[in-house]
């Protein structure tokens, strides 16, 4: 029994060490290479003159397959590595990425587009259960009918809100990656308010925060795909995961990334949620006001 405990604790120690260490960099190649592009002769993994990788070879079946898979981010190991690291050491990986360990991982924006496309493809192709909930627009319409708004201005503003909600819903269906990026930017503002100074990361700019948010979105979209495969339930929300799961994943990410203790992380995250939802409320208010006022311009009718 003692033996098993010891083994588990040793395994855990090794896992923790792996979690806290940035991805391994392959050793410098000692091979003499002649660049196929510029004829420069050199030692190393990349041509020092034009940057073409040393492994670039004449086309054959293997390189062709890799080029085709590269479009989907699967030709090199970097996409798979990014997803594994985002699963097992998400906050630490994001910290590495922000500090400058970029080369080992597939670029986060491309990853978000590819994963989102995959999730949508799966939802359309696989025989999945469609959600029974009513879209937000119908719910709004119904509540407006029952509340019978007597005030004309109020009714018009309600209609403007409806049009804006509609526009946003359309965007979330047709331009999902862009929509997700816009939603992430609201959380970025919240994160910037509460996490721009932290024990593990020191001072972070709002741009760095945004990259962190995009990487978290990658992780959530990857988990959504796994969740879709397990449950076969289509969701029209930002991610297919239940809200509690998103909260738990976000908490672990932020805890690992910024190095605050559990309580401080929880308190600050609560602040982030409040600020982000306030920003989204402003977005709805601003969007509705926009539709409300363009309705008032007579030229547009
Ligand atoms: Zn070259």
Image: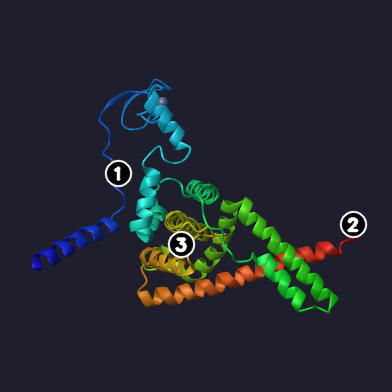
Q: CA distance from mark 3 to mark 1?
A: 25 Å
Exactly how many numbered labels are in the figure?
Answer: 3
Q: In the image, residue 110 lies at what x, y percent?
A: 50, 46
Identify the element where label 3 is drawn.
Answer: loop
From the image, tell me which residue sits under label 2: 299
Q: In the image, residue 272 lies at what x, y percent?
A: 51, 71
Residue 188, numbered circle: none
**Residue closer to the observer: 196 or 10:** 10
From the image, tell me which residue sits under label 1: 25
Q: CA distance from mark 1 to mark 2?
A: 62 Å
In the rendered image, the quadrant that contains the N terminus is bottom left
Q: Residues within 10 Å of mark 1 (few under 14, many from 20)?
A: few
Q: Nearer the viewer, mark 3 or mark 2?
A: 2
Residue 40 lies in quadrant? top left
Give the residue displayed 9% in from the left and 68% down from the top.
2
Q: In the image, residue 193 lies at what x, y percent?
A: 52, 70
From the image, tell me which residue sits under label 3: 204
Q: Is residue 151 left or right of residue 249?
A: right
Q: CA distance from mark 3 to mark 2?
A: 47 Å
Label whose residue precedes the other's in the sequence (3 or 1): 1
Q: Is residue 174 left or right of residue 294?
A: left
In this orientation, does residue 103 appear? no
In the rendered image, the quadrant that contains the C terminus is bottom right
Identify the element where label 2 is drawn.
Answer: helix
Label 1, ligand 1: CB separation under 8 Å: no
In this orientation, does residue 295 appear? yes
Quadrant for ligand 1 reads top left
């Amino acid at each position: 029994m003692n033996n098993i405990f010891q083994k588990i604790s040793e395994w855990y120690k090794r896992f923790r060490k792996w979690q806290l260490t940035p991805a391994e960099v392959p050793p410098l190649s000692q091979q003499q290479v002649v660049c196929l592009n510029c004829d420069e002769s050199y030692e190393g993994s990349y041509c020092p003159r034009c940057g073409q990788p040393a492994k670039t070879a004449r086309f054959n079946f293997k390189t062709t397959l890799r080029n085709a898979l590269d479009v989907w981010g699967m030709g090199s190991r970097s996409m798979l590595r990014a997803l594994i690291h985002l699963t097992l050491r998400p906050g630490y990986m994001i910290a590495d990425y922000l500090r400058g360990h970029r080369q080992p991982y597939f670029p986060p924006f491309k990853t978000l587009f590819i994963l989102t496309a995959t999730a949508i493809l799966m939802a359309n192709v696989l025989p999945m259960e469609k959600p029974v909930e009513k879209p937000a627009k119908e719910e709004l319409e119904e509540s407006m009918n029952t509340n019978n708004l007597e005030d004309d201005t109020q009714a018009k503003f309600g209609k403007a809100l409806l049009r804006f909600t509609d526009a946003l819903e359309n965007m979330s269906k047709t331009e999902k990656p862009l929509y997700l990026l816009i939603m992430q930017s609201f959380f970025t503002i919240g994160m910037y308010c509460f996490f721009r100074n932290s024990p593990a990361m020191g001072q972070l700019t709002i741009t760095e925060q945004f990259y962190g948010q995009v990487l978290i979105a990658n992780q959530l979209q990857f988990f959504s795909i796994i969740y879709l495969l397990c449950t076969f339930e289509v969701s029209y929300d930002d991610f297919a995961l239940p809200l509690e799961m998103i909260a738990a994943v976000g908490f672990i990410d932020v805890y690992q990334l910024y190095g605050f203790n559990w309580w401080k992380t929880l308190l600050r995250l609560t602040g982030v949620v409040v600020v982000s939802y306030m920003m989204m409320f402003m977005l709805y208010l601003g969007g509705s006001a926009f539709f409300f006022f363009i309705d008032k311009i007579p030229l547009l009718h």
